[in-house]
Image (cartoon, rainbow, N blue to C red):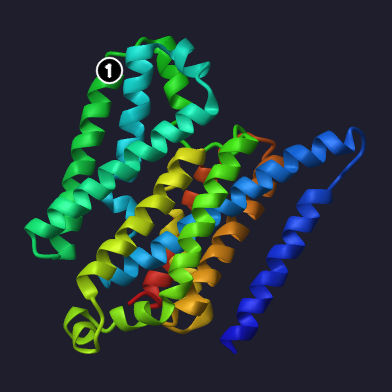
Amino acid sequence: MSDKRLWALFISLVLVVAVLFFWNLTTHIAFILELRAIKIGGLLVVGAAIGVSTVLFQTISNNRILTPSIMGFDSLYLLMQTCLIFFLSGLTYAHMPGNLLFLLNTLTMLIASVVLFTFVLKATRHDIQLMILVGVIFGLVFRSFSTFIQRLIDPSEFAVLQSVMFAQFGGINEKELLSALMLLVLVCCWVARKCQVLDVMLLGRRTAKSLGVDYDRLQFMVLCAISILVSVSTALVGPIIFLGLLVSALAHSLMKTHRHALLLPAAAMISALILLLGQALFENLLERQSTLTVVIEFVGGLFFLVLLSKGKIK
């Protein structure tokens, strides 16, 4: 039954992509198709990265409420953009090459997360809960520091900063998308080989080690995979805080299994579907009077409260 639901998700995703790709084509077809291919590709990459990273993070933390955003990735991203605009000026920031900015954001967040995982896990003897607590504290520090700098920024330059405080899917270029896709494919290929071992990790540290799993090494590798996925998605479009929690809840509710071979692709496809349908709603019905992330956070928050009230999240 779960396999059939996974195929249903795949067929639905293909149909939605096809409809959005060929919808309302009139003139300049080649140019429009190129723009749509980049935008739809960006939505698919970001959706897959968020879905997979959230399920992986909940596996190693053994908590269905937590997402990678609790580690302060979004706060670090906001701090980076704030510092760039403050020290370089909004005009210089606006004219920075997109590839350079993407590479800078990705490498900074990746290096920061790997350093955090290496030293904190070693100091706490691989206590994931303490590491999450340290991540929360760092996130608060980053957000407080960025708020302080924002008060010093010129009002005209603060308008530039506001444009990057929410995820934007219209500014993706082809080179950034290809780089993000390559990293996503590499991580997903590695994760696909570890699905059965990840299933064992759900049994807990002691049980997994008794079954022959090198738990500490695998935990660190999974955290590195999560950091790559989160860094890529955040650097590509900006922070999307709530989507992962919504996607994970939907994937578990729909698939009704703990097998990562089914949960991970289901979460990736559900996340991509939400972004694609949300973008279509945003462009055609709301006529760009809001941002896609605002729609996702509002609808996702309501849905999560419904799941919580019905006891669907345990």
Q: Nearer the viewer, residue 121 or 164?
A: 121
Quarter assignment of residue 89? top left
- Between 299 and 78, the one lying in front of the other is 78
Relative placement, left or right, of 124 versus 298 is left
**Residue carrying label 1:** 151
Q: Position of residue 200 (x, y in %)?
A: 32, 83
Q: Residues within 10 Å of mark 1 (few under 14, many from 20)?
A: few
Image location of residue 184, percent across then percent down: 51, 55
Work out which quarter of the rendered image holds the N terminus and state it: bottom right
Name the residue at 89% across, 33% down: 28
Mark 1 falls on what kind of element? Answer: loop
**Mark count:** 1
Q: Is residue 66 left or right of residue 286?
A: left
Q: Is residue 300 above or below residue 254?
A: above
Question: In the picture provided, is 110 more to the left or to the right than 304?
Answer: left
Q: Position of residue 204 (x, y in %)?
A: 22, 81
